[in-house]
Structure formats: C-alpha cells, structure tokens
Image (cartoon, rainbow, N blue to C red):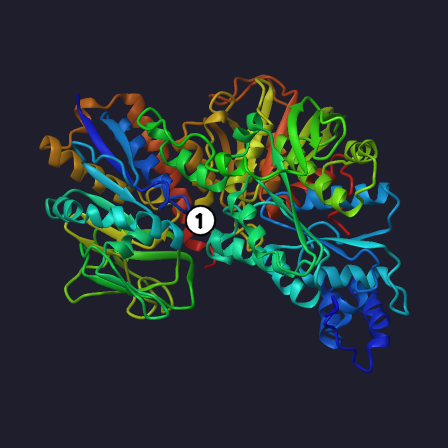
C-alpha cells in the first residue's frame, strides 16, 4: 500500500490554478480568511493533499500534542533547513488540514509540483486524525496530552486516543515524550511494517519542572491542605519512565543555555548549547525537535544540530519580547492550565515587573472558564497583577481573588486596559500590591484571541515583527 | 477552636474542569468568616478521618471512575449514613452520577451507583456542552458550564437543583431539570468552577456544616473587619463574573 489514497479527478490538473486564483481573489476582497482557498480546493479535488505530499522524497513529519506544537514545528523546520533540506511547513496557527491545503496551494507550481524534500506539519489533535486518513506520515512527533479545550475533545484519554491514530498510521519513526505516560503508552500502537519508536526525555532532576496532567490535578486539589498529604508529590511517571531509553535527553537548563544528551553518542557526555528560546518548556520542546531531526538525518553531526537549535527564535506569543518605549514587554500565550503553570514558573516576575492577564472565551480560546481554577496563581501574590482584561476579565479577577493575589484594575475592554497598563506610572501611590514605580519589564498573559488583539494594539505603538502568524 | 473539617473526595482521579476551585472557595470563605477550615484529601485506600463536616466531589474520566469504584463501594454505607444525617455534600458530574442509582452505558452495560440520590443515568453519544444558567428556588440563578454525555433522570419526588429554559441542556436535555437535592446533598453537572461564581451555594454548604457542628453559624463573633471587606470584594467580583457569564454564547 502506498502512502497516498488520493483519487485523481479529471479536472485535477486545474486545482493549483483554481486554488491560486481563489487565493488571490480572497486576498483582494479580504474574503473568507486564509483557509478559504483550501476549502475550495478540498471541495473540487479531494485528492489534492495526498497527491501533492506524495511527491516529497523524505515524506511528511507530523507534529501534534496539546502544548508546544507551534514552537516545536518551527524548530524542526528550521533545523532541517539548516541541514540543507528544502522544507515545506504550514504557517503558525493554521493547524487544520484545510490550512495545510491553503499553504500548499501557495507553494505548488501551476503544474502541481511541490518543490521541497520534506514537509513538517503542525496539526491539532482532532485534525491529525483526519489528516492521517489521507496521508500516512513518515515521521510523527507526539508531545503531550493535557487538559485543553476539553469542551471540544471531551476527555484527555480521548485526546490520547486521537493521537493513537497518528502513531498507528506512521510508516517510519514515531517520536514520543517519555515523561508523559499517556504519550509513552502510544508505543504499543505503532504497527506499520518497519515502523519504530524513539523517545525524548528529561533527566531525573528536571522532571519536577514538568508534572504530568495527573500530578497537576492532585497538587491543585490539595493545595489548601498541603500539610495533610505529603505523598504523591513525585511525578507519577518517574518510575516507569526510567525503563525506557531516550534518544535525546534534556539534562540541564541554564540562563539561555541548555545541555542535551544523545543516546549512542561516543562521548556519552551532555552537549551544551546557547538558546534564544525563553522558558524551560521550550527547551524540552527543543529536545523533542532534536529527537525527530536525529531520526530523519541520523548522520548529521551533533554540533550541527545544536547550532540549529541555537538559532531558533520564539514563535508568536511563546515568550516573544516587544520593546515598548524602552521597556521589554513579554507576550505569553496561555491556552490551558498546564501551559499557564509552566509559563508562570518559567517567567517569574521580579519586584519591578508589571503583570497583565487577558482572558477571552471565544471558540478558539475555549468557552469553558473552569481551566483557570486548575492553575495555581499564588506565585503572583508578591507582585500582584496590575491589570486584568478580556471578555472574562471578571472570572480571572475572581480567580486571583481566591488565590489572594492583589489586583490593580479590571476592565473587559482590551484596548482601554492595555492603554492604562502601558501608561507611564505617575508616581502616585499605586493600588495595593501593585508596584508604583516604573516597571523594568512587563508580562502580558493572553489567551489566543486576546493575543491577536493585544499584538494588534501594540503594533500601533511599537515595532511588532511578523512572528509567523500573519501569513 | 471553631474548626470545620472538609473532605475532598477522590481528588486524584475525580477532579476535572477545575473542580478543585470548589474546595478552594469553601476553604477561603470559611477562613474569611472567621472559622478554621481543615481540608483532608481522601483517595482510594486512605483511612477515613475521624470527623467530616462537609464532602466535596468532582467529575472524572472513565479511567478515573474505574480506579475509585471499588473503594467507593466500600465507603457506600458510610456515605449513605452521612448523607442521611444531613452532612452537606456537593457532587459534580461523575460523582453526581455515582451518587445516583445506576449508570447505563451506550452499549447497555449497567454500573451501580450508591443510591443516595433517586436518579439514574443513561449514556448517549451526544455530549451536552456549554455555558448554562439554571433557576433555583433556593439559590437564585446558578451560573456555570456543563459538559457531560450521560442523561440523568430524577425519580418522582426528587427535587432538582434548578430548572433550565431550553431543551438540549441540563440533566437530560428533555425535562428542563438540572441537578438534584436530597437531604443536604447537592448533585449537579455544573462546572465553572461552580462555587466561586455561585457564593449562595458555597454559603449554604458552609452554614449547614457549621450549624451541624456548633449549633449556630455566627461569623459576626469571629470575623474581623478586614475579613469582612475581603469577602465583600470577592462577592463583587463574583457578581460581575456572573453578569458576564450569563450573557455568553453557549
């Protein structure tokens, strides 16, 4: 059986031309958004996706999981480019099959030729299943399963099942997160002839930075009674995980540097590299990216791989820093409890950090607000939160109130709240708990649609680069 | 010492969609009323504590329910006795179903509950998901978010927690009821978390627990001015959050 299942309709020769035309028209009339041409192409030529991707000599790398898809996809693509491959990848955020088709239409020639060696595609868990029905990936990188958008997927075991379909369909190497029990377990499902499994992992002392979803539930629930139960504080995954050998292990995290250990490396010592990425969890994503690139190009020297890691910059809202009138302003995308927790742990506020939190509840953010109660905000008690905004600003303020975090102001209007947040402090004594002096840094935590609004507002007053979202 | 003992029931496996926010809300409010909350996490295999004034339980995934079920049945008599004695309890989603008579899955398998609440649940393929407002005689409008696939039907004479305005939501999507009230036990599908945005229910659980243990609920005796002000600030934020949540799309 081949990797494609696409049937070729009589008019297939015209799909690239029609698609490109729709795309151009959509741009001019600002109609339908970036996935619109993809929708048309899927309608008139359902085999377009499979047929086009089948041309790739090195096949498709599929990246999925709850947290870190975008950054990791970006890393894998940039590392493979550095190794001399021509890489096709989907633009940030369009992680639905239709978005992939739209991006392909932009890239193929009128004759339908795709000028690339390999595709690195980020796909949302549900769409990944849809995708593997049409195209069998040669490589799959499965990052984690956490409580995210449960209102869409139902339950996290269900989300793991979705990723199980990806593991089943992969024809080459499936790269799994050893420290996430639900992901590591997917190894049992790998069954295509010749398919194999590799893991990426953490050293023992770093594992506490990454509680699994199960650990999270426990730590939050007994937070008020920490003294009552001291058991179960160790990550549940630690004992079983020890048995599995990791291809790439993150062994140390420093200030903008990290150590990675490669299995089978002659020196058998970790290699140190500098990084531009912010946050511990992004470094673990780098280990994931290294593991899959190592599987694709086993002969690439480790130094070359690490040099590629050193060059990767953060993606949209993943520790992106914008200079606002001389004050570094960090934009942090939060979309689920674990991501929010990791973000709070990775970017601790200093005494002169001003913090803002913007929570929306549009479909892309998730309508259900209960996830805010699975995040521990007590680390913000000392500095407080100066401004809370977004449609669900009051849900957030209430959450902070119960964690006894002082809140400066609450305003559901994002533009107004942002203006107040960025206004130089007049020296008048601030609201209780929030710093009155001018800040030396700012942290803005936003949900997805809130991030789009905040970035647009910041772009009017500061230099905001295209971090790959606007394509 | 005016201690109140709260049990968090199976927090390891039955705690999803922010159910832990309910424990935090009761704990913090008790402290602001001048009482001393003491939380015990009870998981399967743990010793049952000497004294319990209130029990809070949440929802879980199918795997979570499987892990607790044996222990849960071992504790069934105890839970039934405490419920009959008037111990205030809040059971959300999965534990609401298990507090009923039985759950029949889509393929016809019947799983027993402990029968504290006269209700049974039938699995269905469609989930009922979305923002929800229900009207309760006891607590006014209850505002939250439901997410469940089981349809729960109350036996004749069992009081619902509240009523919903439209089909396709609430206990079963058909009879416009939501949740149940038996003795001082409240069962409901409302996440949100439920209690932060519904302080009337939190205060009912607190008042009931304190009155059972100390005869009277007298925050004025213990509460400082700062505590009173902090509680008022929380209730203001809850009012605003309720107003916004009630207007959001499903």
**Quarter that holds the N terminus of chain B:** top left
**Image check: A195 left or right of A187?**
right
Toward the viewer: A10 or B157?
A10
Work out whether residue B185 can be spotted. Answer: yes
As displayed, is residue B168 above or below residue A205? below
Work out whether residue B59 can be spotted. Answer: no
Position of residue A338 measured from the top left corner of the image (x, y, whole percent): 52, 39
Position of residue A202 measured from the top left corner of the image (x, y, whole percent): 60, 32
Position of residue A265 measured from the top left corner of the image (x, y, whole percent): 75, 32
Specify the quadrant of the image occupied by residue A217. Answer: top left
- At 20% from the left edge and 47% from the top edge, which residue is drawn? B74
- At 58% from the left edge and 47% from the top edge, which residue is drawn? A66
**Residue at label 1?**
B244
Q: Mark 1 falls on what kind of element?
A: helix
As displayed, is residue B3 above or below residue A263? above
Specify the quadrant of the image occupied by residue A465. Answer: top right
Specify the quadrant of the image occupied by residue A453. Answer: top right
Position of residue A419 measured from the top left corner of the image (x, y, whole percent): 63, 34
- At 28% from the left edge and 54% from the top edge, which residue is drawn? B96
- At 27% from the left edge and 55% from the top edge, which residue is drawn? B98
């Amino acid at each position: 059986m081949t990797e494609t299942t696409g049937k070729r309709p009589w008019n297939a020769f015209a799909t690239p031309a029609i698609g490109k035309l729709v795309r151009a028209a959509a741009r001019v009339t600002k109609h339908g958004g970036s996935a619109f041409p993809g929708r048309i192409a899927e309608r008139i030529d359902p085999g377009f996706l499979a047929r086009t991707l089948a041309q790739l000599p090195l096949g498709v790398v599929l990246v999925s999981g709850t947290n870190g898809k975008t950054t990791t996809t970006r890393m894998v693509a940039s590392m493979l480019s550095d190794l001399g491959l021509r890489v096709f990848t989907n633009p940030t955020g369009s992680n639905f099959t239709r978005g992939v088709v739209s991006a392909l239409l932009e890239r193929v020639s009128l004759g339908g030729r795709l000028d690339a060696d390999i595709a690195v595609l980020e796909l949302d868990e549900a769409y990944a299943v849809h995708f593997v029905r049409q195209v069998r990936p040669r490589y799959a990188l499965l990052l984690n399963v956490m409580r995210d958008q449960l209102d869409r997927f139902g339950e996290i075991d269900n989300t793991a099942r979705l990723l199980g379909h990806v593991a089943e369909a992969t024809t080459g190497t499936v790269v799994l997160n050893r420290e996430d029990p639900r992901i590591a377990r997917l190894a049992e499902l790998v069954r295509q002839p010749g398919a194999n499994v590799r893991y990426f992992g953490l050293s023992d002392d770093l594992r506490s930075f990454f509680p699994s979803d199960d650990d999270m539930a426990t730590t939050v629930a007994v937070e008020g009674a920490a003294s009552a139960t001291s058991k179960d504080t160790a990550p549940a995954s630690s004992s079983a995980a020890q048995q599995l050998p990791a291809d790439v292990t993150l062994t140390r995290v420093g200030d903008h540097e990290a150590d990675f250990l490669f299995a089978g490396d002659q020196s058998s010592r970790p290699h140190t590299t500098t990084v531009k990425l912010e946050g511990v969890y992004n470094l673990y994503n780098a280990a994931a990216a290294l593991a899959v690139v190592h599987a694709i190009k086993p002969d690439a020297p480790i130094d070359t791989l690490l040099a590629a890691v050193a060059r990767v910059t953060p993606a949209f809202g993943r520790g992106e820093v914008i200079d606002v009138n001389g004050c570094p302003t960090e934009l942090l995308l939060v979309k689920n409890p674990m991501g929010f927790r990791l973000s709070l742990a990775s970017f601790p506020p200093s005494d002169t950090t001003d913090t803002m939190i913007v929570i929306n509840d549009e479909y892309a953010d998730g309508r259900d607000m209960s996830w805010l109660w699975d995040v521990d905000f007590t680390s913000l008690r000392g500095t407080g939160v100066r401004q809370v905004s977004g449609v669900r600003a009051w849900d957030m303020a209430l959450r902070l109130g119960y964690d006894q975090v002082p809140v400066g102001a609450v305003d559901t209007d994002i533009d107004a709240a942002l203006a107040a947040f960025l206004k130089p402090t007049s020296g008048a004594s601030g609201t209780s708990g929030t710093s009155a002096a001018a800040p030396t840094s700012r942290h803005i935590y936003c949900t997805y649609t809130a991030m789009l609004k905040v970035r647009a507002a910041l772009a009017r007053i500061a230099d905001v680069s295209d971090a790959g979202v606007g394509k | 010492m005016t201690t109140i003992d709260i049990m968090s029931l199976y927090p390891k496996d039955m705690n999803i969609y922010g159910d832990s926010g309910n424990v935090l809300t009761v704990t913090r409010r008790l402290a602001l009323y001048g009482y001393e909350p003491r939380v015990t996490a009870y998981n399967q295999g743990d010793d049952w504590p000497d004294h319990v004034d209130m029990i809070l339980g949440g929802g879980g995934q199918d795997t979570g329910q499987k892990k607790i079920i044996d222990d849960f049945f071992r504790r069934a008599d105890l839970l039934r006795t405490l419920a009959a004695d008037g111990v205030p309890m809040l059971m959300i989603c999965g534990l609401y179903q298990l507090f009923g008579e039985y759950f029949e899955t889509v393929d016809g398998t019947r799983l027993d509950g402990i029968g504290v609440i006269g209700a049974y649940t039938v699995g269905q393929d469609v989930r009922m998901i979305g923002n929800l407002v229900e009207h309760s005689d006891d607590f006014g409008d209850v505002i939250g978010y439901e997410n469940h696939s089981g349809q729960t039907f109350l036996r004749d004479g069992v009081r619902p927690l509240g009523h919903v305005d439209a089909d396709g939501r609430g206990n079963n999507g058909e009879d416009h009821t939501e949740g149940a009230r038996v003795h001082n036990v409240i069962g409901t599908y409302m996440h949100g978390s439920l209690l932060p945005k519904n302080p009337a229910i939190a205060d009912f659980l607190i008042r009931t627990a304190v009155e059972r243990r100390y005869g009277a609920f007298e925050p004025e005796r213990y509460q400082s001015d700062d505590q009173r002000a902090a509680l008022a600030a929380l209730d203001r934020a809850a009012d605003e959050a309720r107003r916004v949540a009630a207007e959001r799309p499903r």
